[in-house]
Amino acid sequence: MIDPTGLAVALAVLAAATVFGLLRARRDGRLRAASGSAALRFSADELGDDLGARATLVQFSTSFCANCPGTRRLLAEVAGTAEGVRVIEIDAESRLDLVRRADVMRTPTVLVLDRAGHLVRRSSGAPGRAELLTAVELATAV
């Protein structure tokens, strides 16, 4: 005989996991406006490298991140096609101060900064090429 309480708990857990998975898949890699952190600004000194003349792409990575190498290549390709765009990679494990400040919850996290270092867009997860190009255009239009 199947225990109705156990079955109800199992179905509730399954439903919650499905909802979580769908929400995460919907947000994964999406470059979204920097809500709540619109005033967030990063300096070249903080990031350990010069900012781009038009925009800067900042990638937070870890050694165990499976999507980080592909994201690194994508950012380099996009920066190579857009003049004045620079890529800076941050090791999240060694720069916990920046991880906390930028509210990084997973890697890769990509920040798109304008020429002054203001946060324009961000993604948790690997962004898509078209969305990244649009974000760079937004950052360079400021």
Image: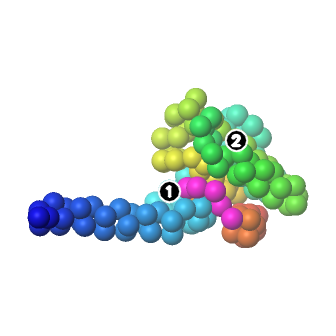
Left or right placement of residue 115 versus residue 94 in this view = right
Q: Is residue 23 visible?
A: yes
* Marking on residue 89: 2
- Residue shown at 52%/34% (left/top)? 97
The answer to whether 108 appears left or right of 76 in the picture is left
Q: Residue at the spot x=77%, y=41% of the render?
A: 50
Which residue is nearer to you in this view: 54 or 77?
Answer: 77
Q: Position of residue 142 (x, y in %)?
A: 71, 66
Residue nearest the viewer, comparing 6 with 125: 6
The answer to whether residue 22 is left or right of residue 10 is right
Dot in front, 2 or 1: 2
**10 Å neighbourhood of mark 2: few (<14), some, or many (≥20)?**
some
Q: Name the residue carrying label 1.
A: 37
Amino acid identity at mark 1: Ser
Splitting the image into 4 quarters, where does residue 89 fall? Answer: top right
Can residue 52 be seen?
no
Foreground residue among 65 and 4: 4
Which residue extends farthest top?
Answer: 94
On the image, the x and y values in percent for residue 95 come to 57, 32
Q: Which is more N-terminal, label 1 or label 2?
A: 1
Q: Which residues are magenta?
A: 124-128
**Displayed quadrant of residue 130:** bottom right
Quadrant of the drawing holding the N terminus: bottom left
Q: Percent from the top left, x then y, of residue 60?
A: 62, 44
